[in-house]
Amino acid sequence: MAMLLGAFAAGISVYVLTNTDTSAFARTLFFAALCGFVWKPVCDAGKAFVQQTVQHQHDAPVEESGNKAFELAESLTNTPAALLPTKLEEIHDSAIAVLESLPQVSSPKVRREAETKVSAALRIVAQIAPQHPQVASQLLESVGETAAKNQSPKVAKEAVTSLEKLAETNRMFAPSHTQLKTNILSTVSARYRLNSVTKPQ
């Protein structure tokens, strides 16, 4: 068993952890044998490497969607007025993709950066919102509600704050602001009731 584990560890060290140049045969053989003798830490390192790689592949789409939402928002100021509704819909779709994936993200850093990108995108959307109040208000309301459902208070707060400020100068945003606050309160209340029911006695 020790020989098998040693051989396995040797393979991990050469082909997975270090991606060794196997053309240098003697050096590769010595390195593999050395790692085979200390097989346990090598196997543990290989397991951790695989887990990290799988998690990165899982989190990568969240990072990409967050970056896309922010980049699209940054391009709004240079977008012709006629194309703004389409661009806003793309921002909405990217932001929703981020928020719906957040519960499965295990990396606090990835989650934090994704939420920061979406929040920044919402702030930019709020700046051009008066040009297309209906589309923008629907975007902010939908993203805010989705954020609340997926336990992202940072993004939900940003959506509420943006609508609140817009409603102060444009009454067209008032219904979305009121509806979003109502939906968030309902979501939080439902979650609290669920936690109360499932909490061990």
Image: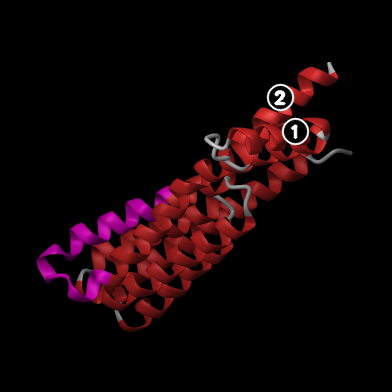
200 relative position to 131: left or right: right
Name the image quarter holding the C terminus: top right
Secondary structure, magenta segment, majority class: helix
Question: What residue is drawn where x is 76% and y is 44%?
Answer: 196
- Say if the magenta span includes residue 95: yes
Mark 1 residue type: Cys
Circle 2 crowding by C-alpha within 10 Å: few under 14, some 14–19, many from 20? some
Mark 1 is surrounded, within 10 Å at the Cα level, by few (under 14), some (14 to 19) or many (20 or more) other residues, namely: many
User: Is disc 2 placed on a helix, strand or loop?
Assistant: helix
Marking on residue 8:
2
Q: Which x, y percent locates residue 191? A: 65, 47
Is the residue 142 above or below the residue 48 in the image? below
The residue that label 1 is drawn on is 43
Residue 115 x, y percent position in the rendering: 51, 62
Looking at the image, the residue that sits furthest to the right is 201
Q: Which residue lies furthest to the bottom in this view?
A: 169
Q: In this view, does 14 lie to the left or right of 134?
A: right
Q: In this view, does 120 lie to the left or right of 50?
A: left
Residue 190 vertical position relative to residue 117 in the rendered view, above or below: above
Instruction: Point out which mark residue 35 bears.
Output: none
Q: Are marks 2 and 1 in contact (CB under 8 Å)?
A: yes
Query: Rounded to the nearest whole Å, what is the CA distance between mark 2 and mark 1?
Result: 8 Å
Instruction: Specify start and end residues of the magenta stretch as a single range.
Output: 75-97
Foreground mark, 2 or 1, reads: 2
